[in-house]
Image: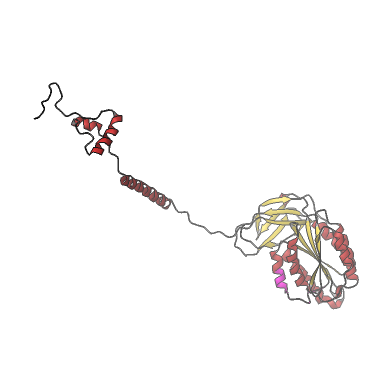
Amino acid sequence: MSKQRQPGLATSPVCPLRTADSSVTSGNAVAAAIGHSPHAGLPTAHCRLLTPRPRPCYSERVRRYLVCFLLIFLLTAWLPALQPQIPTVRYGIKVEMVDLYASVYNSEGKLVKGLSRDDFIVFDEGVPQAISQFSREYIPLSVLILLDTSGSMAGIKLDSARRSLAQFLKRLNDGDEAMLMTFHSRPRITQTFTQNLEKIRNTLRRLEGNGSTALYDAILQSLEVIRESRNPRRTLLLISDGINTFGRSALKDTLSSLRKQSVALYAIGIESDSPDDVQERAVTRSVLNQLTDSAGGEAFMITDASNLGLICRTISDQMHNQYSLGYYPPKTTEGEWRNIRIVTRIPGLRVIPSKTGYYPSPPK
């Protein structure tokens, strides 16, 4: 028998759940547990208000994230392509600053001191360069003495060389260092680089002349050994009385190696004054001039060995009164020899550079 409805009650079904927000969630859980709709018994309007906003399922959220990620990736890949392309220009090799030293003489053969940066012009392949570095301060020196002890040097020549070099060593400044190599049929290191110059003077006293003249072998070996010096300014001082008569090296290879090294060469040639030796003197002068032109420095020729002391003093003064200059060279191709020339804006002055050119090398 069906129950009768009591008067005064609503005719629509009543939701058994409370309408507070905090109760909806628990009602949903209960309804889900018993298999009924969470809003059973509520009026339709009430159910529309209480129904929570549907959330996307987990797979749907993952799909949206992937789409967003794909769009970002495509934009990142396409933007650079939309920018204007700058053509790549391959320039030549640019070397580091070219450092060089220079002594200046007036028409009377006297050293000129006190010049400024603006008094010099440096040409690289004939093009004036901006001098980026200039100094008159003394820079410590490493000198490698290359002494010919062949048979033709025995006697007064070698005696004069001993005395002259002993005086030369006394004129070196604090911080300078020296080394002694001798050569006849082959080069020989008799004293490595030292600031104790008395060691070299003692070695000079014991030298004797004999054998042939392996000049080119000696220069090439000296270029290898001088790398062990500790000072940035490096110089070779060569004393010989003749041309190359022995050894494996050729003049061409020697000139090429001198060009590649930042080492100045001062050469003193002791030549014969005999009329029969005219051709030999001409060859000796030509060879020594080629050597110093390739390296930088100067060649001196004497016929009287007693003048060695004067020439050694001249070279010492020149070494100890040099201007330091530096410039950044133009971009060029690696391996091309580039000529350097230094002049002054003051007429009548002569400049002796420490190098006459350089080979560009890759930047570090």
Q: Residue furthest left?
A: 1
Q: Quadrant of residue 36?
A: top left
Is 43 situated above or below 180? above
Q: Is residue 261 above or below residue 136?
A: below
Question: Which stretch appears magenta?
Answer: 242-255
Q: Main secondary structure of the magenta part?
A: loop
Return the x and y of residue 335 as percentages of the image width and height: 62, 65
Q: Residue at x 84, y 58 (%)?
A: 196
Question: For the view shown, which residue lies furthest in the bottom direction?
Answer: 276
* Any part of residue 6 in sight: yes
| Colouring of the image | secondary structure
Answer left or right for 285 relative to 364: right
Q: How many marks?
A: 0
Write the residue at 67% across / 54% down.
Answer: 327
Quarter where residue 257 is shown = bottom right
Residue 53's spot in the image, x, y percent?
28, 36
* Identity of the residue furthest to the front in this view: 1
Pick the residue in front: 330 or 21.
21
Taking depth in this image into account, of 321 and 184 the one nearest to the observer is: 184
Question: Residue 60 colored magenta?
Answer: no
Q: Nearer the viewer, residue 227 or 172?
A: 227
Query: For residue 109, which quarter of the picture?
Result: bottom right
- Where's residue 128, x and y in %? 66, 55
Answer whether residue 106 is visible to the viewer in this image.
no
Q: Whole-percent x and y of residue 212?
A: 82, 76
Q: Residue visible at 40% across and 51% down?
A: 78
Lateral position of residue 256 relative to residue 81, left or right: right
Which quadrant: the C terminus? bottom right
User: Viewed as shown, does residue 251 lie left or right of 158?
Assistant: left
Q: Quadrant of the N terminus?
A: top left
Magenta run includes residue 251: yes
